[in-house]
Amino acid sequence: MNKVPYLMSARGIVKSYGPTSVLKGFDLSIAAGEVHAFLGGNGAGKSTLIKIISGQIDRDGGSLEFAQNRASPDGVNTSDENGIAVVNQELALLPHLTVAENIALPRRHRGWSVFNGGDARRIAVDALSLIDPTFAQVSVDRLVADLSLHERQLVEIARALDSGASLLLLDEPTANLTAGETERLFAVLRRLTADKGLAVLFVSHRMREIRQIADVCTIIRNGQTAVDRVALKSITDAEIVEQMGQAALGTAQASSRTQRRPRTESNGNEIGKPNALRVQTDGIDLDIPAGTILGLAGPPVGPETLMNALTGVSSAGRWSIARNGVAVTYQRPASAARDGVGFVSGDRSNKGILANLPIVDNLAASARIVGRKRAVRSDEMTDGRDLLDALSIRASSLWDLPASLSGGTQQKLLIARWLKLKPKVLVLEEPTRGVDIRTKQEIYTLIREMAAQGSTIVWWSTEYVELVELCDTVLAFDPDGHPTSVLKHDQINEAELAHATGMAA
């Protein structure tokens, strides 16, 4: 059997979808015992390459070689035969099964073997305890369908860690984890790479995390190799951004704090302003005037209760919510939407994108709910083309499926649904999850413009730097989900947020 100098070596990988060429002869090599950062902008081809390496899709050309086996130049390798485990950007759990069943399932290589529930629970607890011991004890018997995005992300990562694979492909694994969970995951990866020789391909847009965990990096740009196996200590963040083709944003991002709109005031004298929002609970009494960007900081258990109450996903519970001095309680999301409350989820695959409907239907989804319309109208086509142009979304047709767009571009579609509706309140749940620097800046600009037009924005993010960048006021929650404090103006910095939430920045 032919040996290769790396655990995995991809050479000249080519992949197209119809007339769209995604990978154009891309090269990537991964060595045992290293964490390899795989970097590039949205739409550059990262997720496509991961799916090719893991055998989820065919490649059109090029070769893949593994230390254990050798795939034919035009063949498809399988993840089992080459010791690969993958966490995709869009999570791939089975919602009708329990957490234990999802984690233990990859160990079942024979369809008719007897399933041992006790063994499955033990396997799941051990795997989850690597990242979150508390969650491990309380979650193993829950259905995946009942989990939040944050919890599903933990289960997906635990399943990959438990697989015993020699190559772990992680596509935005920390996008919805807290700082503490991220550090525990990194500790596990460091131990497995050092002690077991595990190789990790790590995709992230968070430069701080990349510096924390990765040894080398490869950069993809427009489907081609821009940087091949460069040690991270020998390349600067600015050089990485430049090689990704996003250098023009470096200066814009650095100076955005000085160019941003002034922070609004938030006090009791302004509750009479149009579209004002008031939330009260557990000693918190917060008036939020129109045009405010309110940040929610902390692990998901706290922010989710408020977001669900605002959008009609669940009962208000301990929250008291008023709009313009009138108490409101929504029984379902459609009622909230018709009352001017929009919602954008970071969970594109489960709570956002309508995967089997074309782009035009995705853009018009919110307007149809609000207006109780079903059929595609001519003005929707006109509005759709206007929105694609305004958001710099490149699509050959409004009738294309969202799968033809990158994950970051799909996220812009979710925000685009609300632009023409001008919602009174827009609730954003990790809206920049898994998007690159350019797309983040575009989303920031959209949100600031909506706030300037009078929309009240409620923005939950696990990235403190994002809350510092955007928010006028931040409501902080502790790890148990209790609101702890309200931060304003100069109080909104990473150190204060870490103190208020009990979580590292």
Image (cartoon, rainbow, N blue to C red):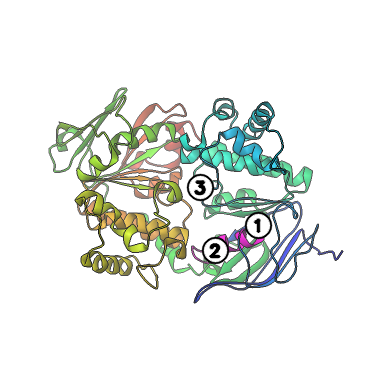
Q: Secondary structure at mark 1?
A: loop
Residue 45: percent from the left, percent from the top? 55, 65
Amino acid type of the residue tagged 1 in the rendering: Ser
Nearer the observer, disc 3 or disc 1? 1
Identified at 42% across, 63% down, the residue is 401
Q: Name the image quarter holding residue 296.
A: top left
Identified at 33% across, 65% down, the residue is 391
Q: Which label's residue is closer to the chain start, 2 or 1?
A: 2
Task: State the separation of the CA atoms marked 3 and 1.
Answer: 21 Å
Q: Is residue 6 left or right of residue 47?
A: right
Residue 479: percent from the left, percent from the top? 47, 29
Q: Residue furthest front?
A: 112
Q: Residue furthest top?
A: 282
Which residue lies under the disc numbered 1?
Answer: 54
Q: Nearer the viewer, residue 473 or 6?
A: 6
> How many numbered callouts?
3
- Magenta-colored stretch includes residue 504: no
Rendered position, 465 above or below 379: above
Identified at 49% across, 39% down, the residue is 150
Residue 63: percent from the left, percent from the top? 71, 70
- Are discs 3 and 2 less than 8 Å apart at CB? no
Q: Name the image quarter holding residue 326.
A: top left
Q: Nearer the viewer, residue 378 or 134?
A: 378
Q: Which mark is residue 175?
A: 3
Q: Is residue 304 left or right of residue 309?
A: right
Q: Which label's residue is closer to the chain start, 3 or 2?
A: 2
- From which residue to which does the magenta span run? 41-56
